[in-house]
Image (tube, rainbow, N blue to C red):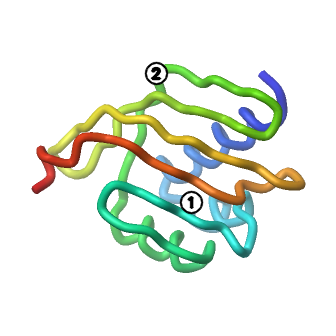
Amino acid sequence: MAQSGKTVEQFLTALNNEDMTAARALLADDFKFVGVLGSRDGADVYIADMGRMKMKYTIHKVFEEDDDVCVLCDYIMGDKTVFGCSWYQLKEGKISSLRVVFDPRPLL
């Protein structure tokens, strides 16, 4: 696995361990998140939300091409588990954007 994929795996491991400092260090300051239920602008805003949510990830498959990384995974939110896809884009070794797709119906 190339460096971009390793960076994303380090990020997800940090989130799973609730190590928000380590997770934040892997994000660009102007990080952008777009998801099914909303979007966030800025790494600090995103990390604050993730710290409150305490979401966990089970990685099934990682695809990587240059600075694009796609992760097929389970998102575990409390007692709900939803399968989805995360598309990470990196710039200068940091995660600059994340777009997430999943069926939100089990959460609503």
Dot placed on the residue nearer the N-terminal end, 1 or 2: 1
Q: Position of residue 66 (x, y in %)?
A: 82, 33
Which residue is found at the position 15% from the left and 52% from the top? 107
Q: Where is residue 27? Give x, y as percent.
A: 70, 62
Q: Which residue is mark 1?
A: 19
Q: Which residue is at a point 44% across and 47% down the rendered structure image?
A: 100
Quadrant assignment for the C terminus: bottom left
For the residue pair 53 and 100, the one nearer the viewer reads as 100
Under mark 2, the amino acid is His
Identify the residue under disc 2. Answer: 60
Above or below residue 44? Residue 25 is above
Front residue of 17 and 74: 74
Judging depth in this view, the residue of 101 and 107 nearest the camera is 101
Picture quarter with the N terminus: top right
Q: Amino acid at mark 1?
A: Asp
Q: Nearer the viewer, residue 64 or 12?
A: 64
Question: Which residue is located at x 71 percent, y 38 percent?
Answer: 68
Determine the secondary structure under disc 2. strand
Tell me the crowding category of disc 1: few under 14, some 14 to 19, or many 20 or more residues within 10 angstroms, Cα based.
some
